[in-house]
Image (tube, grey):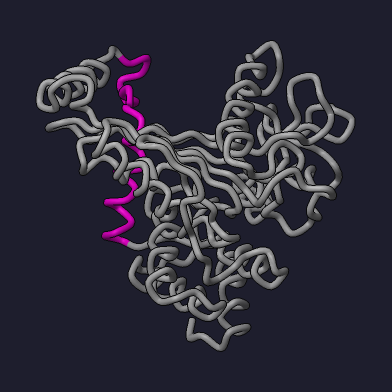
Amino acid sequence: MEQTYAYARLREFTRNVFIAIGCPADQAELASEVLLSADLRGIDSHGVARLSGYVRLWEGGRINANPHIRIVHETPSTAVVDGDGGLGLVVAPFAMQVAIDKAAQVGTGWVSVKHSNHFGIAGYHAMKALDKDMIGMAMTNASPLVAPTFGKERMLGTNPIAVAIPANKQPAFVADFATTTAANGKLEMLQRKAETAPTGWIQDKQGNSSTNPYELKDGGALLPLGGDREHGSHKGYGLGAVVDIFSAVLSGANYGPWAPPFVSFLPLAPDPVGQGLGHFFGAMRVDAFRPVGEFKDHMDNWISRFRATTPIHDEQPVLIPGDPEREMQAERLLNGIPLLEPVVKDLQAVAQKFNINY
């Protein structure tokens, strides 16, 4: 059963919750925008359904609601940002803007981040470069819930990658994907719907394939993109490892099994090797490579030709990365955002906790 809420109503409620935990008004406004961007784009696993998770992190002393975010090392084209334990929803936009500013000056900007937390959907941050005629990139490491190919231990996060590329008349190309077969949030959605997981998403603690969406709570693990070696899981494992190294080893954040978990049922790893979660951002000025108009016209041509691919079935044309999310955003801005009953009850409990009108 679902209930539908207007975007503006949900965003105001979310902002009030962030203010209630001590965020300054401008940061609460930004955090709510970033978080709700996931719901608008149909990525329900990373949107307002996670709001109570941020509250639990704050209650556990793992989120600094009023951080002093700062650059701690930089060159003309690179920087390291210390998020001071703040909401990744606020730290990440700061760091992405640093990357954009550096690209504006020298052609490209690359920023690694330490001492942060979960930053919402990667696509939001990558897309910030589009209106500057830049290509944007964003990635982050995450809770260690993923077993590497041939392994039982949870060593990596879902470690998403997003790339946003501007076009002219066509909508922007926006690829935003986890390096696992499915994100943990998808399992949480299955739990709320009382449904089983598809084969290839998870394994039990012995390394056997499972369809139980609660498997992680019994020591199981998510699987890299591909699911198993025969379907290319070593490639998903490699992608996730690259994200972990760029986001955390490069910045001084915790990496691999030391990454602090978002989920409440996992404790912090002993003997941390860094500070908080890590992110990595990039911005590249298109005109650092070729004239903007020329590039965007060719992106239109690229997109148009791929849209014209002969489909397997006439009722399902070939899509461009970003199409489903863009269409979903238009629909949900008009008709509202549907929330499952367990999510509604979760938000009502948060409202009661802080005496906020739901």
- Observer-nearest of 5 and 126: 126
Q: Where 296 falls versus 130 (above or below)?
A: above
Q: Where 245 falls versus 96 (above or below)?
A: above
Q: Quadrant of residue 130?
A: top left
Q: Which residues are magenta?
A: 311-335
Whether residue 334 sits left or right of residue 80 in the image: it is: left
Whether residue 279 sits left or right of residue 299 in the image: it is: right
Q: Residue at x 44, y 42 (%)?
A: 74
Image x and y of residue 243, in percent:
57, 31
Q: Residue at x 58, y 54 (%)?
A: 116
Image x and y of residue 36, in percent:
42, 59
Q: Residue at x 55, y 62 (%)?
A: 86
Residue 9 visible somewhere in the drawing: yes
Image x and y of residue 60, in percent:
72, 69
Q: Residue at x 49, y 44 (%)?
A: 73
Whether residue 157 sits left or right of residue 103 in the image: it is: right
- Observer-nearest of 1 and 215: 215
Does the magenta portion include 141? no
Whether residue 34 sits left or right of residue 302 in the image: it is: right
Does the magenta portion include 329? yes
Residue furthest right as drawn: 206
Residue 282 visible somewhere in the drawing: no
Quarter of the image that includes the N terminus: bottom right
Image x and y of residue 290, in percent:
17, 19
- Observer-nearest of 96 and 155: 96
Q: Where 56 falls versus 110 (above or below)?
A: below
Q: Quadrant of residue 348?
A: bottom right
Residue furthest left as drawn: 293
Q: Quadrant of residue 258?
A: top right
